[in-house]
Image (tube, helix red, strand yellow):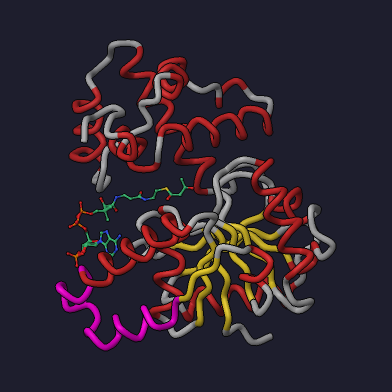
């Protein structure tokens, strides 16, 4: 199974990072967006992040230019996946959106294509069942910022074949990432462990135990986390955190995953973290 052409659906925070690392590693990337302005914004972000890597002498100017030359954009999902060996979907964590995306991909992608989702918590088996080829479906879960974080959680659905698993494991290594295999359960491993910690940090604020800054100082200085849990929640997006906690809560039917009412209220108020300029902190 040879992977050369990769279609990335969605150019948001995760999608542009995924396109960035594939292009820099020599893959031909088609970045698929719904509007030209979103595609342009993704390319601007990729260029900015590549320039940052040049400035830090992590890559050369030629490598940057080569990476950028490997990326083309498409506003038509069917057209954009028609030559793909691997499709990676990085659209919002909304089952309705993901359903229409995967139906379209299934109609238009070549029969040999591996279908991968960057979902952070939706069941891979459920997404795979939206297509006529669940054996070729797999979770390829990257972490933000994608060019920096070394982990790729590789999630096997119920029917994922060993051949597809191995191809994706090799691909992750070719991207200089570390693949870690996990089975398909709510939140996989990453968010099953991370989100309860973030939720508990929010409860600590909600119950008046400490301010956001003091909660974060405890975790940064006492546990050597690079960011405190509330700064990290803002960075991930409070809406995304809430969605993932809801998936855990509904998936396990266990009250220990109940989202903190303060998190629900902040999302209702549109305070979603870095992307809206306000969350537990102002930006
Ligand atoms: N592209 C390329 N390089 C980038 C980058 C980007 N988008 N963002 C940061 N960098 C690089 C910087 O150039 C810098 O490189 P050097 O070490 O060579 O100087 C390095 O990353 C660190 O960046 P900064 O010095 O600007 O800032 P920092 O030291 O505060 O680190 C951070 C920033 C890497 C984000 C760090 O705070 C961190 O690791 N935070 C935790 C991030 C995390 O937990 N991510 C996972 C979130 S969960 C998720 O994504 C999945 C999910 O399902 C919810």
Query: Which residue is more in the foreground, 157 or 80?
Result: 80
Query: Which residue is more in the foreground, 26 or 70?
Result: 70
Magenta span includes 226: no
Location of the N terminus by quadrant is bottom right
Does the image show residue 143? no
116 sits left or right of 20 in the view: right
Q: Quadrant of residue 4?
A: bottom right
Q: Quadrant of residue 65?
A: bottom left
Residue at 57 percent across and 75 percent down: it is 6
Residue at 75 percent across and 52 percent down: it is 125
Position of residue 171 relative to residue 275, above or below, is below
Task: Please provide percent x and percent y for residue 104.
Answer: 73, 59
72 sits left or right of 246 in the view: left
Q: Which residues are magenta?
A: 52-71
Does the image show residue 147? yes
Location of the C terminus by quadrant is top left
Task: Please provide percent x and percent y for residue 279.
Answer: 31, 28
Residue at 25 percent across and 65 percent down: it is 48
View quadrant of ligand 1: bottom left
Task: Please provide percent x and percent y for residue 269.
Answer: 40, 19
247 sits left or right of 161 in the view: left
Position of residue 252 relative to residue 1, above or below, is above
Residue at the outermost top position: 207
Task: Please provide percent x and percent y for residue 209.
Answer: 27, 14
Residue at the outermost right position: 132
């Amino acid at each position: 199974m040879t992977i050369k052409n990769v279609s990335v659906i969605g150019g948001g925070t995760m999608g542009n990072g995924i396109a960035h690392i594939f292009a820099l590693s020599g893959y031909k990337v088609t970045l698929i967006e719904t509007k030209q302005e979103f595609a342009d914004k993704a390319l601007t972000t990729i260029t900015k992040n590549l320039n940052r890597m040049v400035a830090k002498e992590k890559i050369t100017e030629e490598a940057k230019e080569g990476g950028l030359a490997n990326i083309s954009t498409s506003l038509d999902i069917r057209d954009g996946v028609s030559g793909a060996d691997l499709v990676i979907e990085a659209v919002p964590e909304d089952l309705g959106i993901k359903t229409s995306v995967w139906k379209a991909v299934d109609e238009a992608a070549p029969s040999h294509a591996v279908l991968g989702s960057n979902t952070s918590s939706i069941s891979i088996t459920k997404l795979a069942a939206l297509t006529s080829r669940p054996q070729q479906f797999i979770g390829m879960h990257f972490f933000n910022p994608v060019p920096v974080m070394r982990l790729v959680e590789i999630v096997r659905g119920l029917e994922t074949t060993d051949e597809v698993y191995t191809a994706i494991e090799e691909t992750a290594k070719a991207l200089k990432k570390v693949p870690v295999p996990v089975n398909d359960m709510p939140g996989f491993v990453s968010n099953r462990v991370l989100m309860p910690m973030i939720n508990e940090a929010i409860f600590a604020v909600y119950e008046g135990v400490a301010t956001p800054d003091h909660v974060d100082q405890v975790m940064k200085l006492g546990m050597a986390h690079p960011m405190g849990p509330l700064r990290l929640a803002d960075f991930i997006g409070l809406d995304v955190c809430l969605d993932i906690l809801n998936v855990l809560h509904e998936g396990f039917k266990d009250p220990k995953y109940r989202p903190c009412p303060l998190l629900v209220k902040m999302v209702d108020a549109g305070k979603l973290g870095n992307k809206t300029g306000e969350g537990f902190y102002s930006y």
